């Protein structure tokens, strides 16, 4: 190697080291994912909208005013009379008198009975920590925050007869992965056997 080649290689290596050090904590380069399947701003807002429905008083127009329609919630499941029977009666240990009056009236109404199961969520997944440790698979930390809700609304003709809401008001999860060998962690006997085949 000539002295000029050595100096050129040193300058290149110093540039790479400098770049790595300057970007070592650059968290802005880490992946971020967002799930947003509801127009509601919070779990409490979704809950209040569902609980504002009054069985035997609210109707389809009320649902539209509250934003509880399939057009605004892409993950809405439309329930038929058969779906409602399967959920509440079929194979259940509940007796007829144990059912909510609204559910019972829906079951007895046959084809006039319908329903909606609305699911919505606002979930953020963000990777935290060092970009290079994450990029080379040495260490990854993923933080998941947000909320999820599920609402069940039953109708007889156009009148709401039953409503309920559930879900997770607060989602707060942290997943940490540590691989001491980094990108080589997954290389083991199976990979070696495949390389030999």
Image (cartoon, rainbow, N blue to C red):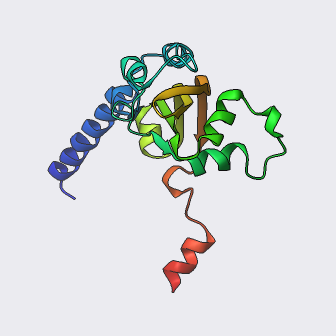
Residue at (52, 83) in percent of width and height: 196
Residue at (55, 29) in percent of width and height: 151
Q: Is residue 140 left or right of residue 108?
A: left
Q: Who is closer to the viewer here, 18 or 78?
A: 78
Q: How far across and down, in percent of the image, does residue 54 sit?
A: 56, 16
| Furthest-left residue in this view | 4
Q: How far across and down, in percent of the image, does residue 90 sit?
A: 73, 51
Q: Who is closer to the viewer here, 43 or 76?
A: 76
Picture layout, residue 129 above or below residue 116: above
Picture layout, residue 138 above or below residue 163: below
Residue 70's image quarter? top left
Q: How far across and down, in percent of the image, does residue 86 sit?
A: 66, 50
Residue 13's image quarter? top left
Quadrant position of the N terminus in the picture: bottom left
Q: Can residue 84 be seen in this snapshot?
A: yes
Q: Is residue 165 left or right of residue 21?
A: right
Picture layout, residue 100 above or below residue 194: above
């Amino acid at each position: 190697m000539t002295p000029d080649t050595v100096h050129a290689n040193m300058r290149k290596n110093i540039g790479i080291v400098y770049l790595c050090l300057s970007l070592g904590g650059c968290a802005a380069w880490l992946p971020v994912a967002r799930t947003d399947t509801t127009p509601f701003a919070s779990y409490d807002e979704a809950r209040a909208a569902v609980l504002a429905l009054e069985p035997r008083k609210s109707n389809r127009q009320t649902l539209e005013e509250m934003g509880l329609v399939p057009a605004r919630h892409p993950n809405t499941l439309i329930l038929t009379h058969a779906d409602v029977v399967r959920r509440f009666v079929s194979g259940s240990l509940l007796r007829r008198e144990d059912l909510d009056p609204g559910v019972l009236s829906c079951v007895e109404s046959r084809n006039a009975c319908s329903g909606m199961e609305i699911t919505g969520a606002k979930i953020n997944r963000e990777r935290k920590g060092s970009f290079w440790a994450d990029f080379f698979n040495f260490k990854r930390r993923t933080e998941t925050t947000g909320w999820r809700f599920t609402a069940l609304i039953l109708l007889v003709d156009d009148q709401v007869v039953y409503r309920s809401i559930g879900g997770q008001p607060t989602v707060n999860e942290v997943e940490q992965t540590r691989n001491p060998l980094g990108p080589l962690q997954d290389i083991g006997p199976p990979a070696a056997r495949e390389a030999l085949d």
